Structures are given as C-alpha cells and as structure tokens.
Image (cartoon, grey):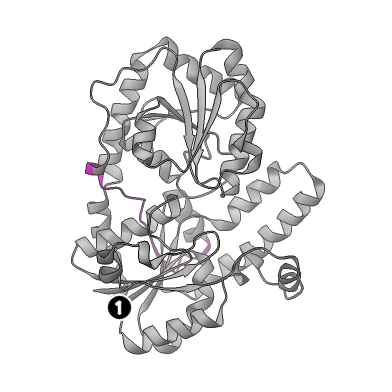
C-alpha cells in the first residue's frame, strides 16, 4: 500500500507530542513494508533543516517540505474574521504548497492520503483533483475543544472574547470536514465518539498513540525517594501546557511546600516562555531543551501534568508510563488514556487533590513502584506501535474496498 502523509509540521526530529505521534505512524507503516511519502509544512515554530536530517529518513519517506510563515498577525486575522473563516486554518494556506502537492500527485499514485490534522485540510480540493486516493483525516485532538476550554479558564474579558471567536470559527471549519473525507482516525475513544455521533455515515476508527515499548527501559530496582522530585516535560509553546503549569505554580505549589518543604519541581521542554523561565517559587527549577527526554524522566520521580484544557492524548504521559513512572494528572490530562485512577496513574483536579495524591506517594513508598509497573504493563497492552500499525492498515484496506 502506498500512503501520502500530509503534515502541518515537520515530524522529524520528533521533538514534541505531535511530531512523535506523526513519526511513529510513519515508522510503523514503513516497518510493516508499506510505502510512505511525507510532505510537510515548515514553519517558524517548526522549521526544517534538511541537511541535519538523517539521510535514510529523507530517502525512506521521500520527504518534501514547503515553508509557510504561520506567524500570527493582526490584519490577516481580521481578514479571516471578516470572511467568516478560521484564522487557525487560513495561516496554513499557501500557493507554494498547492503547487508542491499538484506536482507530487501528478508524478505518483497513492492508495491513501492521510491528513495529519485539520490544518492541512484546505488542500482536499487539490487532492481530489489530481488523485483517486482515499482521504483519511487523522484527528490528533478535537481542535476546537482545546480553545473552548481555554475560554472557560480565561480571566481577562478581552482575551475571553477573542478566544471565543477563534474557537467558534475553528469549530465550524473542523466539523465541516467530515463530509469531505473518506474516513477519520481518532486518537482516543472519547474523540471518536464525539465525531461519530455527529457524523455516523463517515467511516471512522480509534487509532491510539503507539510507542515502540523496547525503546523505553524503566530503571531497574526503582525505589521512590522520600523527598520526590516532581517534574513536567512537554512542548511549552502549546498554550494548554503553559496554562496548566502556571496554574500549578500559582494555586498548588505553595500548598505542597507547606506540607512537604523538601519536594522539588522541575519544568522541562522546548520554547519555555519568559513567564516560566525564571521562577520565583522555592524549589522550582527550569531545564530547556533537555538532550534526552527519557533520561530526564528517569532521573526524576513523579510526573505532574496539571492540564486544564486540551484534547486528544498527552503523548508525554504515555511515554512516562512506558518508563514505569507515576503520573499525577487531571481528568483532562488523562482523557483518551483508558487507565484507572490509583492503578496505572493518579487523578487530581484541585489543589487539595494534588496534595493528597502526592501524600499517598510519600507515605506509601511502594505505591509509586506499583503504579509504575502497572503503567508500563498497560502501555505494552494498549499502546504498542506494532499492533497499532496493523490496525491502521486494516482500516485503510476496509476503506479502499468501500
């Protein structure tokens, strides 16, 4: 089977959750013996340096990129508003990408064109014009839901109004796509259910985020610390991550220190904003661009993911679980991961619940070890990339026969 992956950002190197999710599908399909071509948007936020990419990756994927300046600007945003369009999406529309896709589709024939997110969906008409391939939308999140949740937590009235407009336009566009594609692959069961209830005639399936479990080796004979080192790692140019960490520092951290003054909290990730680079709170450290995320997680004890908004699946949670780490997260953070509270992770939604969850870990030292072991077993069973690749191909095959 021959697949064209159209990506809204360069998937390699896999530096954040979205890149990892895209790249894992690419690698899984290639390993299963299928042909995959990657055409990706290069942006200021996710630039591409072709010279720095591994030669075998470029060769195996036939990688081609087009630069699009997606930097938010006032007048283009106003124009999109006046035209009743989603500015989130119009930023990714480019004549150069249209030319690139036209050229690729005229030269090669594909069985499947997989759209990685709604942001490359504007190119559906080009695909329909030059290809008979089935078009599959990979929904990494319910995109508009992320922004709706941010509206709920926004305190500034003007910010709330602006976010409301953006969320509404994005929702209109996102939901309009399901009559234009042949199928969709949701990253989680809740996301699938949401779309399926509204578009029952559009073929869909759940394809969770998968990992090569062998690449995640837990620490042998792990013994939780009496003074655990909490950590958060993620892409910090994603607003829900910043929002959650700021809330944790403002509303939760002092309560933790009042009860456990020796506990530390380390924030790591790409593009950490100025508001978090120099924390004034006690026992809080910041590490930008850690060279190896797995080594960083193994060097600390408990992962904290205080997500208030967002959608889809948090990739870093799955990676931490694969490493046998205990994760404390909110209900939103755990969405799409069918793990049980107190068994494979811990759920906390309020400052008091975060303190209680941490207290359990400190007062019951074996709890972290047990939860970590359960977490890794859960990932082996439910998020194994080899099994997931087979499910993707089965879905492609069924779609092609309809």
Name the residue at 54% across, 59% down: 45
Q: Is residue 107 above or below residue 275?
A: below
Residue 257 left/right relative to 165: left
Residue 90 lies, with reference to residue 299, above or below; the image says: below
- Quadrant containing the C terminus is bottom left
Q: Secondary structure at mark 1?
A: loop
Q: Which quadrant would residue 361 be assigned to in this image?
A: top left
- To which quarter of the image does residue 320 belong? top left
Residue at the spot x=60%, y=30% of the render? 248
Q: Image point 76% across, 41% down: which residue?
A: 155
Quadrant the N terminus occupies: bottom left
- Residue 402 in sight in this render: no
Which residue is identified by label 1? 111
Nearest the camera: 239 or 364? 239
Asked whether, in this view, residue 387 is left or right of residue 242, the answer is left
Q: Position of residue 97 (x, y in %)?
A: 49, 79
Q: Is residue 224 left or right of residue 121?
A: left
Please state if 123 lies on the left or on the right of 399 as rendered.
Answer: right
In the rendered image, residue 202 lying in the magenta stretch gets the answer yes
Q: Residues within 10 Å of mark 1 (few under 14, many from 20)?
A: some
Instruction: Tell me the quarter of the picture where residue 217 sits.
Output: top left
Q: Nearer the viewer, residue 290 or 252?
A: 290
Asked if 379 appears above or below 39 in the picture, the reply is above
Q: Is residue 141 magenta?
A: no
Q: Is residue 135 visible?
A: yes
Q: What number of labels is visible?
A: 1
Q: Is residue 228 above or below residue 15?
A: above
Q: Position of residue 230 (x, y in %)?
A: 47, 25
Q: Position of residue 71 (x, y in %)?
A: 63, 64
Write the start and end of the magenta stretch as one range. Answer: 198-214
């Amino acid at each position: 089977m021959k697949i064209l992956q159209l990506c809204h950002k360069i998937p390699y190197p896999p530096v954040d959750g979205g890149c990892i999710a895209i790249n894992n599908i690419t690698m899984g399909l290639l390993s299963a013996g299928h042909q995959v071509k990657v055409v990706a948007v290069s942006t200021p936020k996710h630039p591409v340096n072709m010279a720095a990419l591994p030669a075998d990756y470029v060769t195996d994927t036939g990688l081609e990129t087009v630069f699009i300046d997606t930097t938010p600007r006032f007048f283009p945003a106003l124009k999109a508003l006046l035209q009743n369009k989603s500015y989130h999406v119009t930023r990714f529309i480019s004549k150069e990408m249209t030319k690139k896709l036209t050229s690729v589709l005229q030269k090669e024939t594909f069985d499947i064109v997989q759209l990685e997110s709604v942001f490359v969906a504007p190119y559906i008409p080009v695909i329909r014009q030059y290809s008979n391939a089935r078009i599959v939308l990979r929904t990494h999140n319910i995109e508009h839901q992320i922004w709706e949740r941010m509206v709920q937590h926004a305190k500034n009235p003007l910010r709330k109004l602006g976010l409301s407009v953006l969320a509404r336009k994005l929702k209109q566009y996102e939901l309009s796509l399901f009559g234009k594609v042949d199928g969709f692959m949701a990253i989680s069961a809740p996301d699938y259910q949401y779309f399926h209830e509204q578009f029952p005639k559009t073929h869909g399936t759940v394809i969770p985020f998968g990992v090569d479990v062998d690449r995640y080796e837990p620490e042998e004979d792990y013994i939780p610390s009496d003074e655990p080192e909490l950590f958060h790692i993620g892409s910090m140019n994603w607003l829900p991550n910043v929002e959650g960490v700021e809330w944790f520092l403002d509303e939760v951290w002092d309560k933790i220190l009042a009860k456990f003054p020796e506990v530390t909290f380390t924030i790591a990730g790409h593009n950490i904003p100025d508001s978090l680079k120099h924390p004034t709170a006690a026992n809080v450290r910041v590490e930008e661009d850690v060279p190896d995320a797995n080594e960083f997680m193994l060097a600390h004890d408990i992962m904290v993911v205080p997500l208030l908004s967002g959608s889809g699946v948090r990739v870093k949670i799955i990676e931490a679980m694969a490493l046998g780490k205990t994760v404390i997260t909110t209900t939103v953070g755990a969405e799409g991961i069918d793990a049980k509270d107190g068994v494979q992770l811990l759920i906390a939604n309020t400052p008091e619940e975060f303190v209680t969850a941490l207290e359990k870990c400190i007062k019951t030292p074996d709890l972290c070890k047990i939860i970590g072991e359960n977490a890794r077993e859960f990932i082996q069973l439910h998020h194994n990339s080899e099994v997931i690749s087979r499910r993707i191909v089965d879905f492609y095959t069924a779609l092609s026969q309809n």
